[in-house]
Amino acid sequence: MRRVADWLKQADAALSQARDSKEDGHYWASCFFAHQAAEYTAKALLESLGIEARGHSISSLLDRARELGVEIPEEIRKKH
């Protein structure tokens, strides 16, 4: 479970960076850090299920969680 806590700590830090970047008008950086936060959160979810999380695709990570029986809300699952 330590790895889960590590992923969540990194997600919080990335989300904070995303907010700061947005406030500074660095929208590209805000998008990058927001993606990182979502990725780290998805990895924490998988790790909490005992699965080693690999890759950077949020949709792939969430698809793996769904395969394990995790219900992912439609508004999160939507691919744009």
Image: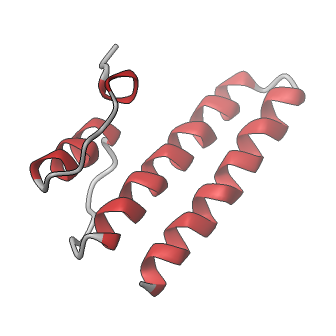
Judged from this view, the residue extending furthest toward the right is 24
What residue appears at the point 17 percent right and 45 percent down from the top-left corner? Answer: 66
Judged from this view, the residue extending furthest toward the left is 67
Residue 12 placement, left or right of 46: right
Location of the C terminus by quadrant is top left
Q: Quadrant of residue 12?
A: bottom right
Residue 52 placement, left or right of 35: left
Q: Is residue 59 above or below residue 27?
A: below
Judging depth in this view, the residue of 18 and 70 nearest the camera is: 70
Q: Is residue 10 above or below residue 28?
A: below
Q: Is residue 3 above or below residue 32?
A: below
Q: Quadrant of residue 13?
A: bottom right
What residue appears at the point 25 percent right and 42 percent down from the top-left corner? Answer: 71
Residue 27 placement, left or right of 8: right
What residue appears at the point 59 percent right and 38 percent down from the top-left corner? Answer: 34
Judging depth in this view, the residue of 14 and 26 nearest the camera is: 14
x and y percentages locating residue 7 in the rendered image: 50, 68
What residue appears at the point 62 percent right and 68 percent down from the top-left corner? Answer: 9
x and y percentages locating residue 78 in the rendered image: 31, 20
x and y percentages locating residue 31 in the rendered image: 61, 30
Judging depth in this view, the residue of 3 and 77 nearest the camera is: 77
Residue 18 placement, left or right of 7: right
Location of the N terminus by quadrant is bottom left
